[in-house]
Image: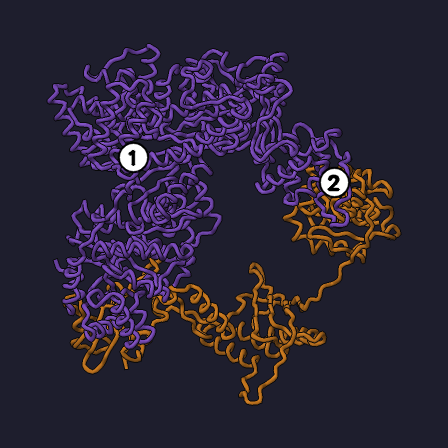
Amino acid sequence: MFACIHVPDSRAAASAHASLLDCASAFSPRVEDTAPGTVILDIEGLQHLFGSTAELAQHLKDYISALGIPVHLGIASNPDAALCAARGWEGTTIFEQGTEASRLKTLDIALLPLEPETYATLLRWGVRSFGALAKLPAKELSSRLGRQSLHLHRLARGCAMRPLIPRQESLQFVETIDLDDALVTLEPLAFILNRQCEVLFLRLRSRGLAALELQLTLQRERPHAPFLLPLRLPVPARNPRVITRLFMLSLDAHPPGAAVTGVRLEAIPSKPRTIQNGLFVPLAPEPEKLELTLARIAAIVGKEKVGSPELHDTHARNRFTMQHFGREMGNREEFRGRKCAEGNDFSANFLSVPPFSPGTLRLFRPELEATVRLQDDAPVWIAFAGMHGAIDEASGPWRSEGEWWRKSWAREEWDIAVSHALLRIYRAGERWFAEGVYD
Amino acid sequence: MSYIELHAASAFSFLDGASLPESLIEACHNFEMPAMALLDRDGIYGAARFHLSGKKAGVRAHVGAEISLSSGCQLPVLVLNRSGYRNLCRLLTQMKLNAPKGTATLSEEDLLPYSEGLVCLTGSERGPLPRALHRGGMPEGRRTIERLVEIFGRDRVVVELQRHYLRDEEAANQRAVEIARSLRLPLMATNGVRYSMPQERQILDVFTCLRNHCTLETAGRLLARNAESRLKSPREMTRLFSDIPEALAQTLELSSRLEFTLKDLGYEFPRYPVPEGETMTAFLRKRVEEGARNRYRPCEERHRRQIERELQLIEKLSLEGYFLIVWDIVQFCRQNDILVQGRGSAANSAVCYVLGITAVDPIGMELLFERFLSEERGEWPDIDLDLPSGDKRERAIQYVYQRYGPRGAAMTANVITYRGRSAAREAGKVLGFDEEAIGRLSKLAGHWEYKDSLDTLQGQFGSCGFDIKKPRVRKFLDICLGLQDLPRHLGQHSGGMIVCQGQLDSVVPLEPATMPGRTVVQWDKDDCADMGIIKVDLLGLGMMAVLEDSIQLIRDHYREEVDLAHLPENDPATYSAIQKADTVGMFQIESRAQMSCLPRMRPDHFYDLVVQVAIIRPGPIVGKMVHPYLNRRQGREDVTYACPALEPVLKRTLGVPLFQEQLLRMAMITAGFSGGQAEELRRAFGFKRSERRMSEIETQLRAGMVDNGIPVPVQDEIIQSITSFALYGFPESHAASFALIAYASAYLKCNYLAAFTAAILNNQPMGFYSPATLVKDAQRHGLKVRPIDVTKSDWLCTLEGGNSGTHPKFAIQIPQNLKTVRANLGCVPELPPSLRIGLRYVHGLREVAGRAIVRARNDAPFTSIDDLALRVPELQKSELVTLAEIGALNFLNPANRMHRRDALWQVERAAQRTGPLLERIETEDEPSPLDIMTHRERLVADFDGTGMTVGPHPMAYCREGLNSRAILRAIDLGHIPNGRFVRVAGCVIARQRPGTAKGFVFISLEDETGIANIIITPDVLDRYRATIIQGKFLLFEGPLQNVDNVIHVKATAVQEIAILETAPPSRDFH
């Protein structure tokens, strides 16, 4: 005999599924993970523990009621009939052996695992119930709807026989510890984390795996939500010390903000990296060590200041974001690909035009605010950084403006010659700045 | 003046310019620039509008284009003289006709034979020089210029300088100056204008995104760097180019050399090839004389006088060729059994009538010739020909191409512009709105003709849950508004054709149309008319095809010959049906509004139909002419005239002006206007209104009326009727042409119902009602309609003899002995024809498969479903299933009739291909284990599979239940007194909210007995909006309005009723 537990509320089904499996496992070692919100368990022999089938059903319902969600229970001589019973009726439905066909006949065929095309055909035929389908001659049905229709026919008659497919524990690399006393400093956390990392990596190594991604979850004293710290590595790592150090550096920069009551560390396994060094290629630093160094730098200067700058595709000046070193190349390729795909318009913008420049421009960082006097809309005198003087010659203005659909910006640049220097200045709104000096 | 802009592009560069030509001219005029050149990309699409607005503003409009070269650059060229214009048009035509749409380019070699008369500029950033400089620096730049000099000649290459405040551009400029000076070529300043005002840069950015399929956020440096590509004032340009003054002077110099404008287009209407020794004038006179003898029997003096008057004007205006060419097309149609009839103002011409172009006698009907042609107006006449829509119209079009050559004739274009829905969709796209939000917005921008407060863009935003105060939403709205009316792409006008003496491609560039074998010019019909190019409209009219098909069916099945030109006048059955508003399917008089007017109007002769066609129009409705006319007709109001002199003009319409001709005559009589002046008045008050022009005409009108001693209050009344009417009024000649078709359709429906119904079903979609309604209406009139059957149905609907029934022609049972006698005489079919629905009504059945069924059946009858599947391999499984589901396979075995489920059962097996070894094994269709379909299931299958049912109406199945709820049938309403509270239910077949009805909605509700009309007030609509808009079967209750046999239910409450989950689609929001 088989019992099926089914959560009718599809929204609750997914979230309750893990609990449902646990509940079923508490009764039988043979539990099938049938679908989200649906499990089937083999209850053969359980009468010795729980009494009659009805009593067992009651035990199951009582146990599951702790979950706080309504479930339907179906019990029948085969898994599919039990499934149909649980899906077709509310509460508990028990089919005595041999009564399946007569009990199922009123059910809607929508409960069967039908392909949309088969379902449409059956509806066109006026076949809407299990009973109507069961009445059709199996051979003729098979010649019209194919071999799979025989299975449907058996399901409709409640006599489909298939073995239960018990679930297997999935491979998870998680280490969890609940602390008796909350930790208020990071130092003791380092010990715990180190221990967890060593155990975790031992398990990984024993299966020939490494970790590419880790997630640290720190349970914090109420009312704080758990503190999540993901760590994505450029290459699969196998060294627990490095991982511990990376986490600690990260925690130094971003502390959890409350006392820690529990630690959970999960690793996403990956195949370890194998590399053949080139004979004439200089040895690069070990990726793990490099990552560690970068993390140390990021902890000091801030994460947003470490990486490779990537210019934004815009006319606006100084727009860039810092990309993690490992991802730089991919983005560039993507950018180049998009531009090239635009055919003629590729050269319509100045991306492809060799930039006109009177020389190398050395930028002032940050740019220096200036006072400029104008005559006929052209700058004739400038003062900045404690210097001032007449402008011998000015070339411009070079105007750019953009992003009018958001917060628009506008900028007017001039190249000016003062005494022996050639400067670039610009005006944004009413303010003037010296931006740099040409070599 | 120090500067003239000689390089500008408009929105007619399609996604590469953001201003209309008129805006550019206006800006140019504001800067007091005497001239300007428009160079749109790969065309002169905007040149006609640019020229006309330039003419009005006193700006000389130079012509040019930016030509896409295969090297990827855009070469700007300007037209020097007529020869240059011809070359440009031919160059563009060659480019467009030799490549798929959107990919056309030219090579330098292509330019060589057409360079004469063109001046070449070196271009903006996408031009040949900047590109060459970028590619290979100075040497490459120099080589490029030298090559251009080779092609165009030294005196016709100008090195162009543009300054948009960009560093890189200035670097290129410096190199260009160096090259120009070394080669001794002139330098010229331009601004490469893409829009007239700085704020329009945003629209150009939007277009850039649309062109590159990206959003504003992701477009990056594809967008403009600044807003400097606007039209700049001469002062600003002088300041910009103060260091190179010769570049400014060159603009004036070159502008003075550009002698060509579109005024010298060089268009000449083709001469008709007459026999040797004859002139076109004599030839036309002969044809007219023959026609007059044929049309007017006898041809009286008044006929001859009018014809002579018209001929003299035609000869004076040298339009003999035009009339002969139209006559030639009509002759072709007649010789090829293509029904043709002129419509519109051509029906005012006796010459058109006697040449057989039109069918209405303008002399008999006292129509005003000047409405068609007048010397003063200086415009070409406009002749529209109605042809049966479909293949026959295409044959007429192809005849014109064949007669004048592929480059001598073309269709006019139709400029598709951005409207509310398309603008919202594109703006949403570029701003990155999600699909769902865009979809919601564009769906809400409905087709309701009447716009209430919710129908504004702001209203739509509110109802979609967008806050108009948010900047992004505000910007969305700005873009939507900015895009309004800008050209989106070029389409093809439905039937406007132009022909030319010589090569049309030297007058305007031609492009390939989407339909094979057709070309289209780069101007729309208004542009062509404005540029003096004569157009002949070959319009497809569904009803013409219906009439033509009906005549053939009558010939084949009734063995009678119907001549539309000689239909019995005042046929009692026809007028009786019209008076009862029993007009479903009849041309022009079938709409709900027409039906509600017919019982009051009670037409009993042809002119009443002319009035009927014209009266339900916005003109008479807005001008409040309808009720006075109907009241006078019913004797409830005295017939009076604003002044006695108007009696002859308005007598036929009982003192109420209903036609455009009447207002022209009113102006002629009361103000002493000539025919031409009167037509000028109509145009002044017409669609392209100009306040100044209207006020000038009104002054003239008043002055004339004062001279004739008409008192001021009467003047006010006359002017009021003219001003409110001129915009929407219907020409009497046009109404008369339409009334002829309306009468013919009514006559055929009343006398040859089977043929008429088959023909109208074969020409769907057309008209006001769906096929389902047409079928039900025909059945109510006694026609036997037979279902789709693969053993009987053709692709189209056909007529068949039946076993019994009433002959629709006589509306009596034909006795058996009479049937035999008539059959023996061979003058009528043995049995009254019934209608067999054609396979074209099977949803999802491809024509190729449908016709294959008929072909295979003609070889040998099908013996089973397996046999059908085997012998018609074109049939796909889904098609077989639909045929089975609608019962079309039930009759395959006459000895053993299947039901639909039997067929469905067999089809599933038959559709499994067994392979060559087993496929020839004979199998018989056997009964299935499946239950027979219920009535309800059959109805659902019929509506889903064919959009109609030939069985009982769905409402008939639940009539008992409806009776118990005191719900009346449509037919019962006529017996209920006015004001009684009633309940009526049915299937919604049409929903309307006309612009003239102040927010009222009209619903046509069909049940098994007929159609009930429901009026819904705006407040009831607000209360039941969703039910009214979406409901398929509705129950209405409210007081009955039953006055003069016009019956409506004024709904006070609405509810949806569960009759059937499906229904034929209603025709909504006309």
For the residue labelled by badge 2, is the local secondary structure a helix, a strand or a loop?
Answer: loop
Q: Nearer the viewer, residue B217 or B943?
A: B943
Question: Looking at the image, which residue is at 37% across and 64% down?
Answer: B70
Q: Is residue A195 above or below residue B198?
A: below
The residue where tag 1 is placed is B323
* Vertical order, B71 against A363 (above or below): above
Q: Judging from the image, what is the letter of the chain drawn in purple?
A: B
Identified at 89% across, 52% down, the residue is A48
Can residue B481 be spotted in the picture?
A: no
Specify the farthest residue to the front.
B277
| Mark 1 burial class by Cα count in 10 Å: few <14, some 14-19, many 20+ | some
Quadrant, the C terminus of chain A: bottom left
Task: State which chain disc 2 sits on.
Answer: A
Q: Which quarter of the figure has residue B688?
A: top left
- Residue B419 drawn at (x, y percent): 37, 44
* Residue A240 at x, y percent in the picture: 63, 77
Nearer-the-camera pick, B122 or A102: B122
Asked if residue A377 is positioned above or below residue A135 in the image, the reply reads below
Report the residue that reaches farthest toward the left: B707
Disc 1 element: helix
List the single residue furthest toward the bottom. Answer: A280
- Residue B464 locus on image (x, y percent): 44, 43
Q: Colour of chain A?
A: orange
The residue tagged 2 is A89
